[in-house]
Amino acid sequence: MSLLEVNSLTKYFGGLVAVRDLSFQVEEGMIIGLIGPNGAGKTTTFNMISGFILPSSGTVRFKGETLNGMKPHEVCAFGLARTFQIVQPFPEITALENVMIGAFVHYHNTTDARRKAGEMLKRVGMARRADTMARDLPLLELKRLEIAKALATEPQILLLDEVAAGLNAVEVEEVLDLVKDLNKDGITFLLVEHVMKVVMSLSHRIVVLNFGEKISEGTPQKVSHDPQVLKAYLGEEVLVA
Ligand SMILES: Nc1ncnc2c1ncn2[C@@H]1O[C@H](COP(=O)(O)OP(=O)(O)OP(=O)(O)O)[C@@H](O)[C@H]1O
Ligand SMILES: [Mg+2]
């Protein structure tokens, strides 16, 4: 049994079909990449999996249970966490307090939540930023903060939506290392990513969407040579395996 199973997932927004009949699986311990040109349906897929929007049809199963209809906080408490394409910390509270919000999913007193949050900030290399207001953090640290907040909910799978977007080459390497480390610690990942270096070097397998439909799936090597994929990306980015 796969950890996460997406079966025939479909989402209509009025007359527009954002995702059509999408099926794929994420096995425990893997890093799976979900890629596709702008508007391909990647974030919509994340939103359906994590309970932020209801699918028009199809099912999401996690640890053998159907998630359809569960609220985002219930999905999260069940072990599936996500980060957002646009980082959304609370700017007027500290880094530690932002991570505590995640910790409160499982820890119901402030002392335990604070301890858990501190551990997670350390895990992402931000212990010394605990007391810094989120509004004063640069983008790389905001991305780390988002990951720490998600980790504080103790996920088995973490969905990252464009974690490398907006970062420079050196910062991208740092995020790559962090994801690899967390994966070694046992966290499974589903990544939406435009930065090809990230998705190609991290993913065990890649699912490619175009206009809401899966057009290819396989190893980074395989999808980067798939004519269908090259055609979908023509005029966008060059795939480098
Ligand atoms: N809430 C919504 N209402 C109407 N249409 C939407 C909504 N959300 C997404 N869409 C449309 O659904 C399609 C898929 O959008 P989605 O955001 O999932 O794409 P994406 O692959 O994440 O793109 P990007 O790479 O730009 O982030 C697009 O045509 C988008 O305009
Ligand atoms: Mg998106």
Image: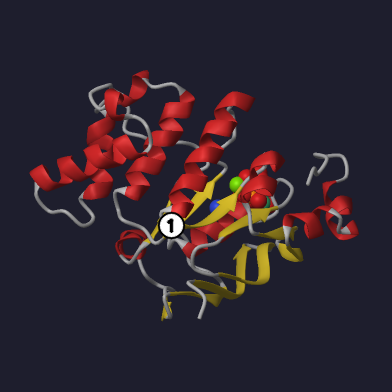
Give percent across and percent down for residue 29.
Answer: 50, 63
Q: Is residue 166 left or right of residue 135?
A: right
Instruction: Kindly identify the residue that appears in the image at 30 percent across and 41 percent down.
Output: 120
Of residues 27 and 44, the one drawn nearer to the viewer in this rendering: 27
Q: Residue at x 34, y 60 (%)?
A: 76
Question: As displayed, is residue 187 above or below residue 173?
Answer: below
Give coordinates of residue 144: x percent, y percent: 42, 35
Q: Residues within 10 Å of mark 1 (few under 14, many from 20)?
A: many
Question: Residue 227: where, in percent of width, then height?
Answer: 90, 57
**Horizontal placement of 150 versus 179: left or right?**
left
The residue at the point 65 percent across, 64 percent down is: 19
Within the image, what quadrant is residue 57 found in? Answer: bottom right
Q: To which residue does mark 1 refer? A: 187
As drawn, 176 above or below 132: below
User: The residue under label 1 is which amino acid type?
Assistant: Ile
* Residue 18 shown left or right of residue 156 in the figure: right
Q: Is residue 192 left or right of residue 110?
A: right
